[in-house]
Amino acid sequence: MVLARTTEKYGVISLVIPVCDEQENLATLVGEIEAVARTGNLEIEVIFVDDGSRDGTWAVIADLAATHSQVQGIRFRRNFGKAAALSAGFRVARGDPIMTLDGDLQDDPAEIPHFLAALAGQRDVISGWKRIRLDPWHKVLPSRVFNFMVSALTGVKLHDHNCGMKCYRAEVLREVKLYGELHRFIPVLAAARGFRVGEIEINHRPRRHGSSKYGVRRIFKGFLDLLTVKFLTGFGKRPQHLLGSIGMLAFFLGGLGMLYLAIIWVVRLFDQTFFTQPLHDRPLLLYSVAALLLGAQMMSIGFLAELITAYQSKDEDSYSIAECTAQSQNPKTI
């Protein structure tokens, strides 16, 4: 029943699969996807993005595209990262919805109908949750810490932000722009635009061939990306609210310190025995001046950030429209 419902609701379903040195896995993956498409009577297109592979991955993709009409490939000149690979795949995808999964066979294509059924339940983004994860502990533990931090700081409560298997309505990806390593934060960025985010448990399988492309460095990069996303979603359109607030606080504390020292200076004019230590020897003077300078700099940076934001956003909507009445499809110019 689930498969029949998803078939009626959706036409072409696009699978965007970024790969790097995965030549042993691709033929098996395509075979599994075809089996799911036949069982559920689904029309699926598969878009492989070769992110600078150094083995025979591209040759395998070219052979699969020649023998399977639903398979196409994109090859990067070098490794540009997963976010760039996903963006390239999203750009050519003609389906709605659009799914992402990894090419290492750890994501099970049999979960595709479950994602489609969940998406039909009034959701715009469905993220996978590998409750039982078949990875080494040194990958699982940092990932769980990272997921907790993302959920706590962004308010988007997902168990597995890092999961590569996700499903999106096409309109989500038209509004969410990717760069750097922000691909793991698409649900967070989508939620900031007002899209509805959900999660389902998925089957996670052990890696058969190749090796993981992620190491310990991803933890530190992920934390920096998290700070970026927190700033973008909270203050991306109003940077002065954050930078200016920090500047005003520093300016206020510096002013209090200088006021305190000024009172001491005035009192000493009448009583030389009061606070005999010279004012220029007091650490408070240095801290107060530093706070005043920091406050002025933060507020100045905030103004510059506002100017840049206003210039770059003049042709970009700061809102997301869910639907319109017929009369609002072509509003008259006022």
Image (cartoon, helix red, strand yellow):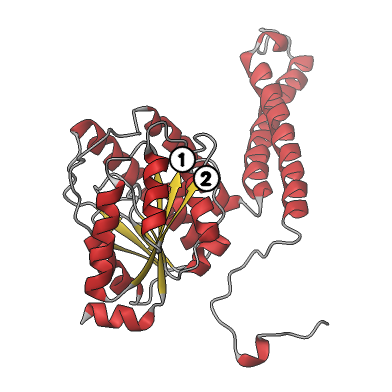
Q: Residue furthest right?
A: 334
- Image marks 1 and 2: residues in contact by CB distance under 8 Å: yes
Residue 314 x, y percent position in the rendering: 76, 59
What residue does disc 1 label?
Answer: 51
In which quadrant of the rendered view does residue 72 lie? bottom left
**Rendered residue at 69%/61% (across/down):** 316
CA gap, disc 1 and disc 2: 9 Å
In which quadrant of the rendered view does residue 280 lie? top right
Residue 156 visible here:
no
- The residue nearer to you, when weighing 48 against 248, is 48
**Rendered residue at 24%/66% (across/down):** 36
Q: Which mark is residue 328?
A: none
Kind of element beneath mark 2: helix
Residue 79 visible here:
yes
Residue 294 x, y percent position in the rendering: 68, 29
Does residue 302 appear to the left or right of 76 in the view shown? right
The amino acid at mark 1 is: Asp
* Crowd band around label 1 with a 10 angstrom C-alpha radius: few (<14), some (14–19), many (20+): many
The amino acid at mark 2 is: Ala
Residue 276 x, y percent position in the rendering: 67, 7
Q: Which mark is residue 84?
A: 2
Q: Which numbered mark, 1 or 2, is in the foreground of this view?
A: 1
Does residue 109 appear to the left or right of 310 in the view shown? left
Does residue 73 appear to the left or right of 159 in the view shown? right
Q: Residue furthest bottom?
A: 327
* 137, above or below 199, in the image: above
In which quadrant of the rendered view does residue 142 lie? top left
* 275, above or below 112, in the image: above
Please state, as top left, top right, bottom left or bottom right, where the C terminus lies in the image: bottom right
Which callout, 1 or 2, points at the residue further toward the start of the chain?
A: 1
